[in-house]
Image: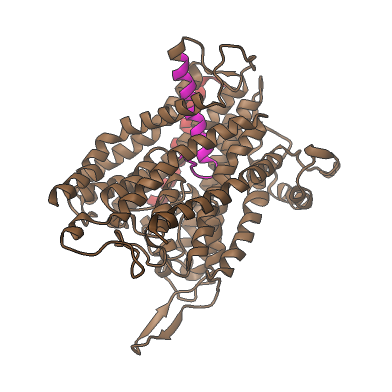
């Protein structure tokens, strides 16, 4: 099979599977978040027909009620945006304290068969912030640093809760469009409970079994000593990998059980597990567009966002694959055979697994950075300059094609507001979106939202290249070293978590700097998105007129894509020119 | 050392809480 055919077949299979699940899963999530709160006096299955809560909610109602009682939550009390935001912040801050404490105390805690010592304070701080913010940036090697209890009770739990946090912010923003003349956006505790219990847990359980069936390990015993063919002794790290792997991908978290992440054969052993992981990364972010369409009662609005996401993502996947397929021109000049054949995958295979080859590695690199996942099955640092440009640029676009769970939807909705504002300026009408006038308050919030992340990326990068502690981590001086630092801060601020592996980031400087950037890059945009939701919810709905810009057609999709690219290119091209772009020209000139 | 990093966490939380209050002032009380 030619390289082109296998690449196209992989794309067709992957997107076919994902698109087949968009409407069923999106509709299910809309019903989960629209269902009434269960109370002892009213059975949740009292309603009939389309409004009837899904079966999972009816089965889980007793557990849900018990959880609310246990935590002293009043589920019927809805919150305005500021209370919703503060509840979210408190919840996540408590998670950070738990993850920090578990790492510092792991030597005295159970499920530590390797007797691993406490994690250093700066690394524990970085990891705690990393996992509560859904970034999962890892400056350490999991198998030699963290005990099973920390991996399960700390990291895996946060994989669920940070993903649920992203989903509920997106749902709150959609409610802002749906409600009118209202202050309340819902109850944070109810939303986060439902996102975890009824969306993430069932999907993760099914996927964990599927991954284990495809060869991913799930084991609580100690590490194993084996004798190799050369009669040497080798230690094989083991662990409960499949259960962490499933939520790592579904929640677009990305933090690997092992340092090599999804390139490790125990995390991702073959083509089937690779396809399952790619599917899991994409399915919830894409399905949330259908949730949006269902909640605003116009499925076409969701389709418009989905088409815009696909039109941004697919060409960049093709660019990454094309760049990697043609290999390294310096090696070609020296007569190295880089052509795909029955004997080899061909192309630039440095940093890639032979069992995945060019196509599955390039697709994974683009998909993991188009979402906020950050899992890797190849080393992005070893990609060609243009191939490496793709994941870096996808992160810098704001991870909205389709973005992380929830984060992708709320980010593209902010860009949609910007798009209709620009259209309004062009045709001289007050901008409106989904029946809501976009006024000064909304534009201030949207502008702050869009500016926050680039500010953190560019200031963080500038600081790192200006101080000795920042430059000390660079293994490849020159444009590639600059790309490594730019990638690190882009990944941290956008809560992606993948890395250009050449940077030594487990230092006090990078642990503290990226920790701060991850926190601000996560919660400040969330606060702004919730404020936007509150502002929109308070506005009255205005009727559609002949002057209203349709937001479900090709014109709007083009406007949305144009706004995203314009902001991304204008913000980052100067920095990209100093990294991957100049590196590409240097490589071309050397040949 | 732990105290320094716990204070840093508290500082990040506090800064974000203040950010919420600043945004409330910017767009008005919900």
Q: Colour of chain B?
A: red
Q: Colour of chain A?
A: brown
A310 or A322: nearer the viewer:
A322
**Please, what is the dominant secondary structure of the magenta stretch?**
helix
Image quadrant holding the N terminus of chain A, namely bottom left
- In the image, residue A166 lies at what x, y percent? 54, 42
Farthest residue to the top: give it.
A428
A228 or A333: nearer the viewer:
A333
- In the image, residue A446 lies at what x, y percent? 46, 26
A456 or A409: nearer the viewer:
A409
User: Could one spot residue A69 in this view of the protein?
Assistant: yes
Dividing the picture into quarters, in which one does residue A256 lie? bottom left
Taking the spot 48% from the left edge, 51% from the top edge, the residue there is: A11
- In the image, residue B3 lies at what x, y percent? 40, 52
Please provide the residue range marked out in magenta.
A400-424
Dividing the picture into quarters, in which one does residue A171 lie? top right
Taking the spot 34% from the left edge, 65% from the top edge, the residue there is: A341
Farthest residue to the front: give it.
A1
A371 or A555: nearer the viewer:
A555
Q: Is residue A283 above or below residue A175?
A: below
Q: Is residue A427 above or below residue A209?
A: above
- In the image, residue A556 lies at what x, y percent? 50, 25
């Amino acid at each position: 099979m030619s390289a082109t055919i296998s690449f196209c077949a992989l794309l067709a299979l992957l997107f076919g599977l994902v698109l087949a699940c968009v409407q069923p899963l999106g509709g299910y999530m809309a019903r989960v978040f629209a269902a009434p709160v269960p109370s002892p006096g009213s059975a949740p299955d009292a309603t009939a027909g389309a409004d009837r809560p899904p079966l999972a909610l009816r089965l889980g109602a007793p557990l849900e009620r018990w959880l609310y009682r246990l935590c002293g939550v009043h589920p019927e009390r809805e919150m305005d945006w500021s209370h919703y935001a503060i509840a979210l912040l408190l919840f996540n801050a408590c998670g950070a304290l738990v993850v920090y404490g578990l790492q510092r105390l792991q030597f005295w805690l159970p499920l530590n068969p390797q007797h691993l010592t406490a994690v250093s304070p700066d690394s524990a701080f970085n990891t705690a912030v990393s996992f509560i913010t859904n970034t999962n940036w890892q400056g350490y090697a999991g198998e030699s640093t963290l005990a099973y209890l920390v991996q399960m009770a700390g990291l895996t739990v946060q994989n669920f809760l940070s993903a649920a946090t992203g989903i509920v912010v997106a749902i709150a923003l959609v409610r802002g469009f749906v409600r009118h003349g209202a202050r309340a956006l819902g109850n944070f505790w109810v939303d986060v409970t439902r996102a975890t219990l009824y969306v993430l847990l069932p999907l993760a359980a099914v996927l964990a079994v599927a991954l284990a069936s495809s060869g991913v390990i799930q084991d609580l015993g100690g590490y194993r000593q084996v004798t190799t063919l050369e009669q040497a002794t080798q230690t094989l790290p083991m662990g409960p990998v499949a259960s962490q792997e499933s939520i790592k991908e579904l929640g677009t978290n990305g933090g690997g059980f092992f340092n090599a992440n999804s390139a490790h054969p125990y995390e991702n052993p073959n083509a089937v597990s690779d396809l399952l992981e790619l599917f899991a990364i994409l399915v919830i972010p894409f399905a949330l567009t259908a949730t949006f369409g269902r909640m605003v009662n116009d499925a076409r609005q969701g389709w418009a966002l989905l088409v815009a996401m696909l039109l941004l993502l697919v060409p960049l996947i093709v660019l990454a694959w094309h760049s990697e397929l043609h290999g390294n021109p310096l090696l070609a000049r020296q007569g190295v055979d880089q052509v795909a054949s029955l004997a080899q995958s061909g192309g630039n295979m440095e940093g890639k697994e032979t069992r995945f080859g060019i196509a599955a590695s390039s697709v994974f690199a683009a998909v993991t950075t188009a979402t906020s996942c950050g899992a890797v099955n190849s080393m992005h640092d070893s990609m060609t300059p243009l191939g490496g440009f793709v994941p870096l640029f996808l992160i810098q676009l704001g991870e909205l094609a389709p973005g992380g769970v929830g984060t992708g939807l709320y980010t593209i909705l902010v860009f949609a507001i910007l798009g209709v504002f620009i259209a309004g300026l062009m045709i001289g009408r007050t901008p409106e979106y989904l029946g809501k006038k976009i006024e000064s308050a909304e534009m201030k919030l949207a502008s702050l939202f869009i500016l926050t992340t680039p500010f953190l990326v560019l200031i963080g990068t500038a600081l790192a290249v200006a101080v000795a502690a920042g430059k000390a981590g660079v293994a490849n001086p020159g444009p590639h070293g600059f790309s490594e630092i730019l990638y690190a801060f882009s990944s941290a601020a956008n809560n992606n978590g993948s890395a250009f592996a050449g940077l030594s980031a487990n230092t006090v400087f990078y642990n503290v700097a990226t920790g701060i950037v991850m926190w601000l890059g996560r919660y400040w945009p969330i606060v702004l998105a919730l404020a936007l939701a509150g502002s929109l919810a308070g506005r009255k709905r205005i009727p559609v007129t002949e002057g209203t810009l349709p937001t479900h057609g090709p014109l709007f999709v083009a406007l949305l894509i144009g706004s995203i690219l314009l902001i991304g290119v204008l913000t980052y091209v100067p920095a990209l020119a100093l990294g991957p772009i100049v590196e590409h020209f240097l490589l071309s000139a050397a040949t | 050392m732990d105290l320094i990093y716990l204070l840093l966490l508290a500082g990040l939380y506090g800064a974000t809480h203040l950010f919420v209050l600043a945004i409330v002032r910017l767009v008005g009380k919900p």
